[in-house]
Amino acid sequence: MRHVAVSSGLQESEIRPSTLMSEFKRLSIEESKTYFLDPGEVEEIDCPACGSHLNSKVFEKYGFSYLLCADCKSIYVSPRPTDEALAHYYSESKASRYRVDHLARNTAQARHRHQIAANANWMGRIVDESTQSTSKSYTDIGTTLPQLFEEMASFDLFDALTTFEPVSPLDSVYSDLKVNVAESRPSEQTAVSSFEKLEHQFSPYDYLVSVKDMLSDEGIFFFTTRTVSGFDLQVLGGNAPYIFVPEHLNLMSIDGIEKLLDRAGLEILELSTPGQLDLQFVHHTVEQDPNIRIPAWISYLLTHRDAEAHEDFQAFLQKHRLSSHLRVAAKKKS
Ligand SMILES: [Zn+2]
């Protein structure tokens, strides 16, 4: 299994313009209180990563309890909104509308430059190295930024490009690039991707099994998610300002995700944490709220060491899979 470190000078503000994020977060928190209020709309669960029922409550955010799995150390919301309640929320809520209208579009350029290109290159390289079939197909699930397909088309690697359940459904990019907008779940795909979706699934296990059914025998599933094994989440815990329901129901550990993939019948080709922002997230968070306590050593590192030390520290986090931005490539077990 490979793991990779990258650096491209990414700034937090380039990915998450703070006023837009604040409004999205405000809407999400406000609506989570109305959409997931009735006892029938929430359900208690065991650890979504490893299935253990042993847990302890670690923090509460906006009325929801986050539990720590005693076994794999994943953190997860329980009781959590049911699948039906989540589907209703995503189709009707103002927060979902806001994501499409503002959050995705306004950050598209910065994301295009850094994340989309990096993700596309990552997928293209692994598909090229690891698959034999002469005719290759690619599907992205829940496409937020259609520009991803511009990158994927530029490789001349795939004969068919498909978006399934796109968040941005009407973008002209799809028609210009002849991207299929699938009505039902495609099958026999050489590559399937899903970016930042696993963290808000009611059941990550069911999600992975349904994705596995989309793959050809040599097909590869690519995904990114947030992991609680990462530095910023370990340091900030419940004080991490960008963690809220229903966006973040599952903050699985690296160990938990390895167990989950195995249970779902997937074999890991690459599992890495190429995140570049952990230290910046911690720094900004404590600057904005000085009441948040962090370990003295980390405070000292932030205030008494220069940019070079901070870059080296972030590189260390990447190298040892200790950043909270996780990416995984996996194939069906043979
Ligand atoms: Zn667990």
Image: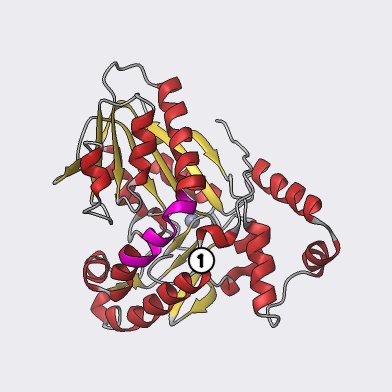
Q: Is 299 positioned to the left or the right of 226 in the image?
A: right
Pick the quarter of the image with the N terminus: top right
Question: Based on the displayed image, in which of its 4 quarters is residue 85 positioned?
Answer: bottom left
Q: Let me know if residue 70 appears in the view.
A: no
**Residue 10, image x and y in percent?**
60, 51
Q: Which residue is mark 1?
A: 17
**Residue 194, image x and y in percent?**
36, 46
Asked if residue 71 is among those painted magenta in the image, a careful observer would answer no
Check the image and tell me how it is coloured: secondary structure
61 or 158, which is in the foreground?
Answer: 158
100 or 33, which is in the foreground?
Answer: 100
Which amino acid, by three-letter code, is at mark 1?
A: Pro
Q: Residue at x 48, y 34 (%)?
A: 122
Q: Let me know if residue 128 appears in the view.
A: yes
Question: Based on the displayed image, in which of its 4 quarters is residue 296 positioned?
Answer: bottom right
Q: Residue at x 42, y 79 (%)?
A: 26
Q: Compared with residue 103, is residue 175 higher up or lower down, i.e. above or below?
A: above
Q: Dot 1, crowdedness within 10 Å: few (<14), some or many (≥20)?
A: few
76 or 271, which is in the foreground?
Answer: 271
Magenta residue span: 101-111
Q: Compared with residue 98, is residue 128 higher up or lower down, i.e. above or below?
A: above
Extreme residue in the right direction = 304
Q: Residue at x 63, y 39 (%)?
A: 5
Secondary structure under badge 1? loop
Q: Is 222 positioned to the left or the right of 213 in the image?
A: right
Q: Is 115 positioned to the left or the right of 175 in the image?
A: right
Ligand 1 has an atom within 8 Å of the beta carbon of the residue at disc 1: no
